Every structure is written in C-alpha cells, then in structure tokens.
Amino acid sequence: MSTITFDPQKLVGPINDLVKVQLPRATTTALNQALFATRKRLQEEARSVFDNPVPFTINSFLYEKPVQVEDTIRARVFVRDDAPKGNAPSRYLDPQIRGGKAYVTRFQRSLLNTVVTQIDGRQTQAAQRGTLLRPSASDRVRRNRYGNMAPTQYNQILSAIKGGKSSADFQDAGAVPFNLRGRYAYLDEEALDNQYFVNRFRSYPRKAGIYKIEYLQKQPRFYRVMTQGSVPTYNSKFKFFDLSTQTITDEFTRRLRSQILR
C-alpha cells in the first residue's frame, strides 16, 4: 500500500474566510475527480501493458469515494480483491505489479488436490508442485476472443480428471472404453516414457501435461492441450503505485485550484 498526504492550504496559497468555507467541499470534489481520472489512467495502462486483457481485468481498478474522518478527508484506489466465479484480480495482478512468481489459479490448485493413476499404476497429483499448466498451441484448445482457453474447457478438464479417468485406462488399446471420446487425462513424464505412449508419439515431443483423447478407427489419439512447466517469475511491469501516485497528485492539485478559483 502506498499513501499520499496533501495539505490543501499549502496547495492553494493564502487562505481567506471565503476560501476557508469553500475548502472542505472543494477538497472532496477535487479528490473524487482525481480518483476517477486515476482509474481511467490505470485502465489505459493495462490495455497498453497486457496482451488483450479481458474486461474483468480492465474493470478491476476501483476507488472508494472521499469520506471525512474528523479533520481528514480520505479515499483510496485499489485492485478488486474478490471474484465470485474465478480468481481475484488483486492476486493474479500482484506479480505484474510487485514482481514475483505467477499466481497459482483456482484451476491449478484443483489439479494439485486431485490424484490420478498413471499407466504404470503410480498414484500422482494431476499436476506437480512448483509447476504450472499452460494452454498449448494445439488446435484442440478452444479459445475465446481474448486468446485464452475457454472457461468451459477448463471445466471439462477438471470434470474428466476428477471423474477418475487416467492414463491407466489406455494401457490396452483394445479395451479402451469408447465413451471416453473427447475426455482428458493428465500424463506425467514417467508415464510418457512407457512404450504404449512412445509408439504413439513418434512425430512430436512427449511432454507432461493435460491430453485430450480422440479416436481414429477406435484407436485412441492424444493431443496435448496444456503443457506442464516451471512457474514463471515476472518483473514488475505494471506500475500501479507510481501511476496512481503521479495521477492523483497532478489531478488533485489542478482540480482543487480550479474549484477554489472559480
């Protein structure tokens, strides 16, 4: 959190009786206008810094209107910290603002809490700690207009994996249940070294991740829709605090003087 303190009397110069009466209301009005301008500036910067951000992210910059507490008028600009159906922007934007490791989303945490059986009988988590699953370049990834994997596909992946299906179901190609068409399985690197998968991945790399299962002549084919990799670390690239401080300072000073002088 960053705090800015203003002394309006120092900003507007000599205070006469008329200005003294005007000052509380003028301060509130000017601060409210400065907060609105700051929110707009943050939204513009987000569109510039991030690659095709979704509206939920753009609209996550909020402010609380000025309120008077004794002799002080207070307000704040902040990033939304709740999300009833997803991940809170304050959490997933924090690494972009402060720098640090990428936020582990609700989807990723669900996979960490789900156990699947690999083809050799091992019990593993449907993701590994210290890693992140990211959508691959496969045409089996359904993308929304912002270029992200569609939420419905995330839900289908979780539903399939939590339903108990795993790579162990595909060990005997002749016994694969045909109703698994379009389902998903988590395959780790050790499982992909099994001869069953080696024979089916001759033409492209075998990497741990989430695979979609489709069938050709009743034989399962596997398409990697999410690839497992290390959790990325970000540098601070969205200057939330600097932008907020600069914009509020400039806008409040200008607008307060305008309110007093008119």
Image: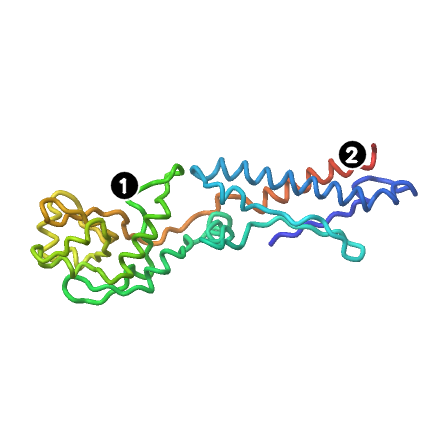
> x%, y% of residue 94?
49, 52
Q: How many marks?
A: 2
Residue at the (40%, 51%) spot, across then down: 233
The residue labelled by disc 1 is 137
Mark 1 residue crowding within 10 angstroms, few (<14) / some (14–19) / many (20+): few
User: Left or right: 14 with respect to 239?
Assistant: right
User: Left or right: 182 with respect to 2?
Assistant: left
Quadrant of the rendering where the C terminus is positioned:
top right
**Disc sitting over residue 255 in the figure:** none
Q: Nearer the viewer, mark 2 or mark 1?
A: 1
**Disc sitting over residue 258 in the figure:** 2
> x%, y% of residue 71?
80, 55
> Mark 1 belongs to which amino acid?
Ala
Q: Is residue 208 above or below residue 10?
A: below
Quadrant of the rendering where the N terminus is positioned:
bottom right
User: Left or right: 16 with respect to 252?
Assistant: right
> Mark 2 belongs to which amino acid?
Ser
For marks 2 and 1, give the CA distance: 54 Å
Q: Secondary structure at mark 1?
A: loop
> x%, y% of residue 175?
9, 58
User: Left or right: 208 with respect to 106?
Assistant: left
